[in-house]
Amino acid sequence: MGQMFKGKAPTGDASARRLRAHGAQEMGEPRASVIIPHLNTPELLVKCLQAVAAQRLDHGWFEIIVVDNGSRVPLDIVAAAWPGVKFLIEREPGPGPARNLGVRNARGRVMAFVDADIRVDREWLQRGVWAVEKDPSRPYGGDVRIDFKDPRYPTGIEAFEAVFSFRQKMYIRRKGFSGTGNLMVDRELWHRIGPFAGIGKAEDRDWGMRAAALGAQTRYVPRMIVFHPARMNMDEVSGRWGRIIAHDFTKHISSGKPMLLWKMRAWAVMASALVHSPQLLLSSRVPTLGARFRGLGVLFETRRYRFMKMRSIAREGHLETAMQWNRTS
């Protein structure tokens, strides 16, 4: 049985005490199921659980399901502190398979997907549930913002990622998919679209494209907000883009497009640093002007890395990155 909440649950130790007391008193199916894949970030998972447990619904209740994807250290301690949460294990690498196992064990009408390193806004679940219940014929994605460690002095990486790393509105309205770190969908529609893909594909984009092909275009819900921590260093930023490039190259080759077009895209990426500099300097998503200037250095370094990686992968056809990322996170 999954986590059960009615109204607003407290966080921290008080939350765990309430779960033990609240237990199985609820009857019937939950209104929503919050599904959280996890890999090797137990401290962030606890913060995620605290934020999810504090959600408020206008009526009904919701469950929480955590699916560990092969962490180095088992989640026994976390599970003991959160006795009402359902903890599962998915051995097949990839967040897609982990989410699929969560859905198979979910009982709610609304499937609410969020990542273990994310902190949800206090109205996140309610906003998404309202959207799905109003029109269950389509999926819904919300805004992803950077969780600044110190909003008074954001780092260059935080500034860069606040503008360029989680552009959910653009992904949804122009490319037709939502990142699965902030996605809600009716359970019946999810089954009609089918499960998320494995680690070899960008499962969020693949799933969103399949949904669109069935006429279920994803909608953007601006007040369905989550907060994602920025990467810690340039190696993590580069690792993310390495995975994206590997997936994009696989898609490019499988579609039969010429290699010359890929090489032209690489040069366009390099030139885009100049084009996108004003977007960073004028962005309201970065709280200080100094942080925006610090972000410029990250912007140019990231575009240089992407250019070099795209040229390298074209020469070598080196796709291992797409298969390894889940084991090295």
Image (cartoon, rainbow, N blue to C red):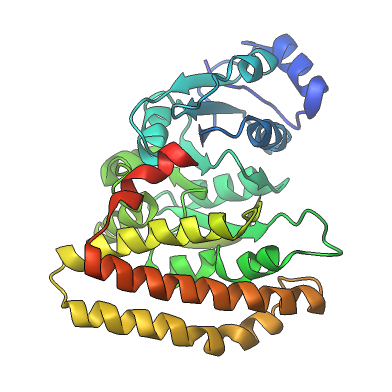
Q: Residue furthest left?
A: 256
Residue appearing at x 45%, y 58% in the figure: 178
Percent across and percent down for residue 31 are 54, 32
Visible residue check, residue 257: yes
Residue appearing at x 69%, y 78% in the figure: 283
Quadrant of the rendered image containing residue 287: bottom right
Percent across and percent down for residue 76 are 59, 14
Visible residue check, residue 189: no
Percent across and percent down for residue 289 are 80, 79
304 or 143, nearer to the observer: 304
264 or 198, nearer to the observer: 264
Rendered view: 199 above or below 204:
above
Percent across and percent down for residue 27 are 57, 15
90 or 192, nearer to the observer: 90
Residue appearing at x 31%, y 68% in the figure: 312
**Is 171 on the left or on the right of 104, as rendered?**
right
Quadrant of the rendered image containing residue 64: top right
Residue appearing at x 62%, y 22% in the figure: 4
129 or 86, nearer to the observer: 86
Rendered view: 304 above or below 26:
below
Q: Residue furthest right?
A: 152
